[in-house]
Image (cartoon, rainbow, N blue to C red):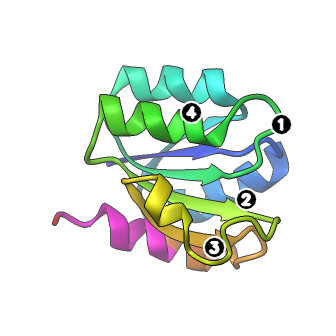
Amino acid sequence: MTLLIVESNPQLAALWRRHVERQGRTVRVAHDQAGAVSALRDGGIAVVILNVLLTDGSAFAVADYASYRAPNVRILFVTAASFFSDGSIFNHVVNACAYVPVATPPEDIAAMVEHYAAPI
C-alpha cells in the first residue's frame, strides 16, 4: 500500500511522511495538484492525505481525479481553515474518509492511515 501526501508545506509533508514510513508504508509526496495527479496516474495509491488549501492547484480537483481514476482510494483531508467544519465535505467528495485539523499529531495521522489502508 502506498500513501500519497499532498501538502504545500514541505516540512509538514516530511513530518507526516516520517511517521507513516515508521509503520513500514511506502510514501509519495506531491506539493501541488499537478504532482498529485501524476502520482495518482502512476497507480498503486491506497490512501491520500490531502490538504484542502493547496498553494498551487485545487484539492477538489485532486479528489475528483482520484475518485475517477481509482475509486477505492480513500482521501483523508486536513486543513487549517474552518471550511467544511460542519462535515459537508463528505457530501462533496465521495471517497473522503476523514477530515481533521492540520495540527493533528502526526502519530494520529499515521494511525488513521493504517486504519483506512486496511482491506475492507
Alpha carbons under labels 2 and 3: distance apart = 16 Å
Identity of the residue drawn at 58% across and 60% down: 77
Q: Main secondary structure of the magenta part?
A: helix
Identity of the residue drawn at 49% across and 54% down: 92
Q: Earlier in the sequence, mark 1 or mark 3?
A: 1
Q: Is residue 20 magenta?
A: no
Q: Secondary structure at mark 1?
A: loop
Q: Quadrant of residue 109?
A: bottom right
Identity of the residue drawn at 40% across and 21% down: 41
Which of discs 1 and 4 lies nearer the camera? The answer is 4
Circles 2 and 3: CB distance less than 8 Å? no
Q: What is the three-letter code of the residue carrying label 1?
A: Thr
Q: What is the three-letter code of the residue carrying label 2?
A: Leu
Q: Earlier in the sequence, mark 2 or mark 1?
A: 2
Q: What is the three-letter code of the residue carrying label 3?
A: Val
Q: Earlier in the sequence, mark 2 or mark 3?
A: 2
- The residue tagged 2 is 15
Q: Is residue 96 shown left or right of residue 84?
A: left
- The residue tagged 4 is 61
- The residue tagged 3 is 100
- The residue tagged 1 is 55
Q: Earlier in the sequence, mark 3 or mark 4?
A: 4
Local crowd at mark 3 within 10 Å, few (<14), some, or many (≥20)?
some
Q: Is residue 23 shown left or right of residue 58?
A: left
Identity of the residue drawn at 79% across and 71% down: 82
Q: What is the three-letter code of the residue carrying label 4?
A: Ala
Segment colored magenta: 111-119
Alpha carbons under labels 1 and 3: distance apart = 19 Å
Q: Secondary structure at mark 3?
A: strand
Q: Which quadrant is the C terminus positioned in?
A: bottom left
Q: Quadrant of residue 85?
A: bottom right
